[in-house]
Image (spheres, rainbow, N blue to C red):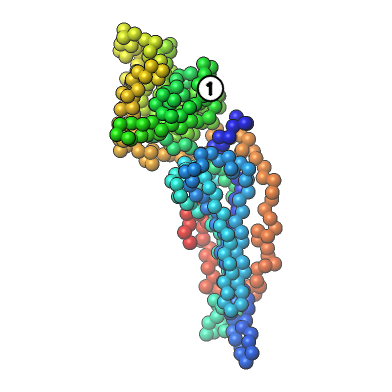
Amino acid sequence: MAGSNFIDYVKIFCRSGRGGAGSLHFHRAKYIPKGGPDGGDGGRGGHVILRGNRNLWTLLHLKYRRHVFATNGQAGGANRSTGRDGEDQVIEVPCGTAVYDAETGEFLCDVTGDGEEVKLLRGGRGGLGNWQFKSATNRTPRYAQPGEPGIEKAIILELKLLADVGLVGFPNAGKSTLLSAVSAAKPKIANYPFTTLEPNLGIVEYRDRQSFVMADIPGIIEGASEGRGLGLRFLRHIERNAVLLFMIPADSDDICHEYSVLCNELATFNPELADKPRVLAITKCDLLDDELMDDIRQNHLPQDVPTVFISAVAGMGLLELKDLLWREINDENNRIPTKITHRDLDEQHRVKEEDEFIFSEAPSEDFYDEEEAPDMGGKMQDEDRWDNDFEYGVNDEH
């Protein structure tokens, strides 16, 4: 996987800008001996914003951009001049990206739509200048506010592909062959296990110029939820699928046993996957005659899932499969937005090489410089905007 360009898990370090300090200044002009306070407010620090981009399909561009720093706001000036706001940093991510706190593994937010923006880290607010504190009883305030500090956070971005149908099966079950038969996708197909090393997406054409998206992931083996094979790394992409299509070859020794193993692996990875609608496809049926097919249908199939017999090579049963999938996809109870449940990251779901990544650059010294903060004179005013109960949060619109 080291040479693959499909990057779906990356750890980066973000920092929002701090607010500029308010100005401590008094108006000085000819013939105006007592101009009064006119120090302006400091500018807001830059935000760190996530934006969905449908033209991206991996996180490769962020693997080589580990640090995202917004700029600081500038200090206020004379004549009530407000300092310039810091420049926001926008992180373009593929649609379907989930964000987690790298320290705790807590789910923070996700981006699913093209152009959708989420304010990940809010920039610090600028401090008030001394003109904000003047009053009838305090005509020459000799203090101003420093800017609020920014926020530093290491985050994990995890891509979960958006698709209507997800293909689930053991290696060499015919998943890639089916995808190539019903769509224009061209996945690698060979007669050895784990031919597919990264997920593939295909758009399946349906009646009346309608279509849906099908996703193929590498084959799952028993124990995939514990890290065996390639299943653990790519099981996350099934979480966003509306319908799961289980694929088991007709020449399997025990179809019911293989189906139960696949179900158990999904439930172990994420218990919410057990509630997703399922369809079972018996593949490679061009090897069967009518008598064997009837025997399998009557004695060797699980009873709680709709089943269809197909052969991607011979084109057998593909239209019936599309009809069945289309009905499941358009069921109101199976729509993708209502079926997504993001579990927090734990040791089992982390990628070791990313989780242990050490950022080479320490926070810069100008992240918060005490020397730039104006003299507060040991006082804090009632008008102070720094509320004690202020909380930093995602999607804070202030």
Evaluate whether residue 384 shows in this view.
yes
Task: Indicate whether 391 appears above or below 295.
Answer: below
Q: Position of residue 254 (x, y in %)?
A: 41, 13
Q: Is residue 207 left or right of residue 287?
A: left
| Residue 332 in the image, given as x and y percentages of width and height | 30, 38
Q: Residue at the location (54% across, 66% down)?
A: 386
Q: Quadrant of the N terminus?
A: top right
| Rendered location of residue 319, percent (x, y) | 32, 24
Please say if 372 is above or below 284. Answer: below
Residue 144 visible to an observer of this rendering: no
- From the viewer's perspective, is 71 left or right of 255? right
Q: Amino acid at mark 1?
A: Thr
Task: Using the image, determine if residue 229 lies above or below residue 117.
Answer: above
Disc tally is: 1
Q: Residue at x 31, y 9 (%)?
A: 290
Q: How many other residues sit within 10 Å of disc 1, few (<14), some (14-19) or many (≥20)?
A: some
- The secondary structure type at the circle numbered 1 is loop
Q: Residue furthest bottom?
A: 31
Query: Where is residue 100 drawn, in percent x and y?
Result: 53, 44
User: Quadrant location of residue 83?
Assistant: bottom right
Where is mark 1, residue-wise? 195
User: Residue shown at 63%/48% (left/top)?
Assistant: 67
Q: Residue at the location (58% across, 43% down)?
A: 61
